[in-house]
Every structure is written in C-alpha cells, then in structure tokens.
Amino acid sequence: MLAAVSTPRVEPGVASGATGEGKIPVKRPSWGALLLALIPFIAMCFTIALWDRVEPMVFGLPFNLFWLVAWIVLTTLCMGLAYRLESSREKRNGGRR
C-alpha cells in the first residue's frame, strides 16, 4: 500500500530558503520583462504560416531552419534585456523585492 505523503503548505508569493529557514519573498516580474519573454515564444510558435517554406535559402540554410536558429539567438537578446530591465527596477526600488 502507498503511504500518504504530506507536503508543506506554501504561501503564495513566498519561497522557503535553501535550508528551509526563513521565508524569501518572491518578486513578480514587470510587464515589460514578461513581454520581452513572450516575443520569442510568439515568433517561434505562432508565426509558422509565415515561415513554413524551404525557399529562399539564407546562409545555406532553408528559410524555416534559419528562422528558428535566428530566434534562438534573438531569445538570448530578449532575455538579457528582460534581466537588465528587472535589475534596473530593483536598483530603483533600493534593493527591495
């Protein structure tokens, strides 16, 4: 028989520390950071009808493969901008979460 496993109750917006001591408040991301994160997701998932073709060849790659590789690289740029946005927000707030 399976024994019942009890899990600790977690409060919304609060994460427990690595050692389980104390509570660390969870900071919600800004709308700008969320939008920057959504740009690559939308570009790769919801624009398939626009790039689902082999021709033209770009840098020796079929266009659809080039599109996905380009957005993988651009995702790094978007995430970096989102990080900078959140870092500057934290500095403006004086390090408060």
Image (tube, rainbow, N blue to C red):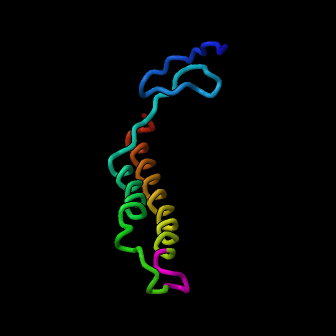
Quadrant of res 43: bottom left
Residue 54 falls left or right of residue 6: left
- Residue at (65%, 24%) from the top-left corner? 19
Q: How many marks?
A: 0
Q: Is residue 40 above or below residue 65?
A: above
- Residue at (41%, 74%) from the top-left corner? 52
| Residue 78 on image: x %, y % | 44, 60
Residue 21 falls left or right of residue 54: right
| Residue 15 on image: x %, y % | 51, 27
Magenta extent: 58-64
Q: Is residue 35 above or below residue 92?
A: below
Residue 25 painted magenta: no
| Residue 14 on image: x %, y % | 46, 26
Residue 60 painted magenta: yes
Q: Is residue 25 above or below residue 77?
A: above
Quadrant of res 8: top right
- Residue at (49%, 69%) from the top-left corner? 68
Q: Give the quarter of the figure containing the N terminus.
A: top right
Q: Is residue 21 above or below residue 86?
A: above
Viewer-side residue, 71 vs 78 = 71
Viewer-side residue, 41 vs 62 = 62
Residue 76 falls left or right of residue 91: right
| Residue 58 on image: x %, y % | 49, 84
